[in-house]
Image (cartoon, rainbow, N blue to C red):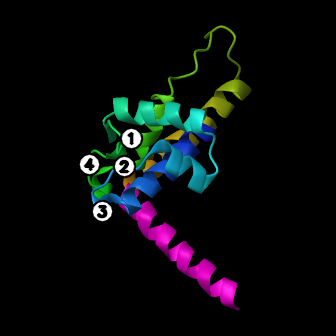
Amino acid sequence: MELSCKVDYACIALLELAMRHKQGKPTSVSEIAISQSIPIRYLDQVMSMLRRAGIIKSQRGAKGGYHLALEPWQIKMIDVVVALEGDSPQEKTNPESITAEKATVIDIWEAAKVASFEILHRHTLEDMVRKCEEKKQSFDVMFYI
């Protein structure tokens, strides 16, 4: 299952928000865009989609921005994917044109999709924050070697 750039950017932005979550202050789109080298217009669209899905909340004003609508442990990665990509509807095939080969390929892709959805359902934003912190520590160690 290949995920879009939208999902990548959403996960990166959510990681930023999760790491700042305890501070209680909103984070602007421009702060995230600059720190992560993401095009601001594209990130703006992604953040709007996450807001409509109830994953993040926005705060207006001079010191406005976005913050998580839920605790990081409550946000499953599957919810992020569905918010941006939808439920990924089944491919419609004409039963008359299906061959044994095509049916076999469809079965394999469906199994792969189910497996990836199960993995995304198990992992939360909190899990991603933990992994990100581990990576940051290993990058620091590698920098000093």
Q: Are marks 4 and 3 in contact (CB under 8 Å)?
A: no
Quick one: label 4 or label 2, which is nearer the N terminus?
Answer: 4
The residue labelled by disc 1 is 79
Q: Secondary structure at mark 2?
A: loop
Q: Which one is nearer the viewer's eye here, 2 or 107? A: 2
Magenta stretch, overall SS: helix
The residue labelled by disc 2 is 76
Q: Are marks 1 and 2 in contact (CB under 8 Å)?
A: yes
Residue 131 shown left or right of residue 4 in the figure: left
- Which label belongs to residue 23? 3
Residue 79 shown left or right of residue 89 in the figure: left
Near mark 4 (Cα within 10 A), the count class, few <14, some 14-19 or many ≥20, is some
On whether residue 131 falls in the magenta region, the answer is yes
Q: Which residues are magenta?
A: 125-145
The image position of residue 129, as x and y in percent, is 43, 64
Location of the C terminus (image quadrant): bottom right
The amino acid type found where label 3 is placed reads Gln
Q: Secondary structure at mark 4?
A: loop
Name the quadrant containing residue 3: top right
Cα gap from disc 4 to disc 2, whole angstroms: 11 Å
The image position of residue 98, as x and y in percent, is 67, 16
